[in-house]
Amino acid sequence: MNGPSTAALAVLEREIEAPGDGLDRLRLAPTPFVPEVCLHLAEDAIVWWARMEAAAGRTLPPPYWASAWAGGQALARHLLDHPELASGRRVLDLAAGSGLVAIAAALAGAARVVANDIDPYAVAAVTVNARANGVTVAATGGDLLDGDGAGVDLLLAGDALYDGELAGRVLPFLRRVAATGADVLVGDPDRGHLPAAGLEVVASYPVPTTEPSVDSPIRRVQVLRSR
């Protein structure tokens, strides 16, 4: 696993310092459902993505990290409302995106927080967002899904089941992590890929949506844990 790439981190830091309030800019703002955490988010992630691809002259991965996804917001809210879940524990935030869930775990008193994402820009975003919130999060890249999360006490997965192909890899990973004795918490806005067994609902939240192309301003999100 690697930390943030110098190039991706330099791009985000440059974007954060750039003047302007247009739709193609990042801005630091409280997360709607978790105002304790501020994130550098795009006013319009699609517009921001298009500008960055034009500037780079190449295709870039979708900037999932530039929006506060409902599953992550619900999971972060749950951690801050129940800090005993993370306090003193070794935490892994899978498919961390902006780092919202990882930051919440750090604020809840986790002994160590690792935020993992395969997108180098997400790894950079976790770094700048953790810094903005005054917490320590180890942001790492690389694909962890063939492992078992060894050394983790609590695995967090906010909105990590957003398509069938990804769910087909994430769900076996969650089961392997749970089999090591770690706790697993999932935030899911009913994307249709949850298993019929193995997870139980512990909370349900109405979460404001900020991600692109949604048909409702509020999504009902379940927080589930491994049985």
Image: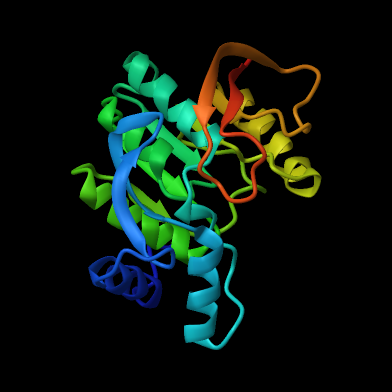
Q: Quadrant of the C terminus?
A: top right
Choose between 181 and 84: the one closer to the eye: 84
Which residue is outermost to the front?
22
Residue at 67%, 39% in the rendered image: 215
- Image position of 8 (left or right of 70): left
- Image position of 118 (left or right of 9): right
Which residue is outermost to the bottom?
57
Can residue 30 be seen at all in this image of the molecule?
yes
Can residue 227 be seen at all in this image of the molecule?
no
Which residue is outermost to the left?
134
**Residue 225 on image: x %, y %:** 59, 18
Choose between 89 and 121: the one closer to the eye: 121
**Residue 128 on image: x %, y %:** 29, 57
Q: Quadrant of residue 153?
A: top left
Residue at 33%, 47% in the rendered image: 39
**Residue 208 on image: x %, y %:** 50, 31
Choose between 96 and 180: the one closer to the eye: 96
Q: Quadrant of residue 112?
A: top left
Residue at 29%, 23% in the rendered image: 88
| For residue 41, above or below residue 120 | above
What colour scheme was applied to this rendering of the protein? rainbow
**Residue 108 on image: x %, y %:** 29, 25
Q: Quadrant of residue 218?
A: top right
- Image position of 91 (left or right of 171): left
